[in-house]
Image: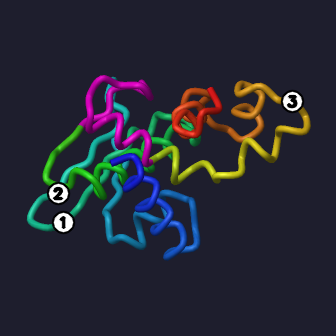
């Protein structure tokens, strides 16, 4: 499944020429709505063949982007399920949540990101700060490549 997730995210990026999850959602005809959730980060559902992503408008921009990418993962991998995102646990024990996080990582992070910073000996935390990403999202993407 990990290879499929990498393939599918690459296919979306190449087809629509963007890593921006809001642009991807629009191209995929997924309706995005913003809500005033108290604890919920976001959700994905498909109702009568209409696909919806709900995002907490109180999240910062970086978190909204991450949430949208994660929910696109659910759209592409678990369309038959209605799923809710309560936190940013990138190494979740839930198979569906882990897979959506992995898809988000592949959507948001180019394959050569570590190469870009290798000559400067940046830590994952430094790369994350430079790229406005969560360190664990970077770890999740590159874990399979044997970098960590």
Q: List the single residue furthest toward the front.
A: 146
Contact, mark 2 vs mark 3 (Cβ under 8 Å) = no
How many angstroms separate mark 1 from mark 2 (CA)?
5 Å
Left or right: 45 in relation to 33: left
The 10 Å Cα crowd at callout 1, few under 14, some 14 to 19, many 20 or more, is few
- Residue 114 picture location, percent across and down: 73, 41
Residue where numbered disc 2 is placed:
46
Task: Answer above or below: position of 14 versus 55.
Answer: below
Which SS class for mark 3?
Answer: loop
How many angstroms separate mark 2 from mark 3 (CA)?
44 Å
The residue sitting at 82% across, 29% down in the picture is 122
Q: Earlier in the sequence, mark 2 or mark 3?
A: 2
Left or right: 20 in relation to 90: right
Contact, mark 1 vs mark 2 (Cβ under 8 Å) = yes
Q: Quadrant of residue 147?
A: top right
Residue where numbered disc 3 is placed:
121
- Residue 2 picture location, percent across and down: 39, 46
User: Which region is colored magenta?
Assistant: 84-103
Number of numbered tags placed on the structure image: 3
Task: Answer above or below: position of 147 versus 65.
Answer: above
The residue sitting at 50% across, 63% down in the picture is 10
- Residue 35 picture location, percent across and down: 34, 42
- Residue 70 picture location, percent across and down: 40, 45
Residue where numbered disc 1 is placed:
50
Which of labels 2 and 3 is toward the front?
3
């Amino acid at each position: 499944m990990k290879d499929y997730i990498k393939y599918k995210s690459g296919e979306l990026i190449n087809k629509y020429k963007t890593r921006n999850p809001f642009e991807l959602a629009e191209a995929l005809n997924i309706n995005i709505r913003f809500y005033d959730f108290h604890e919920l980060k976001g959700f994905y559902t498909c109702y009568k063949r209409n696909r919806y992503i709900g995002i907490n408008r109180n999240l910062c921009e970086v978190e909204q982007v991450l949430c949208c990418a994660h929910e696109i993962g659910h759209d592409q991998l678990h369309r038959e399920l209605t799923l809710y995102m309560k936190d940013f646990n990138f190494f979740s024990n839930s198979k569906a949540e882990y897979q959506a996080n992995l898809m988000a990582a592949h959507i948001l992070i180019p394959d050569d990101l570590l190469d870009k910073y290798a000559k400067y000996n940046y830590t994952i935390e430094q790369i994350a700060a430079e790229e406005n990403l969560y360190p664990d999202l970077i770890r999740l993407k590159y874990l399979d490549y044997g970098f960590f």
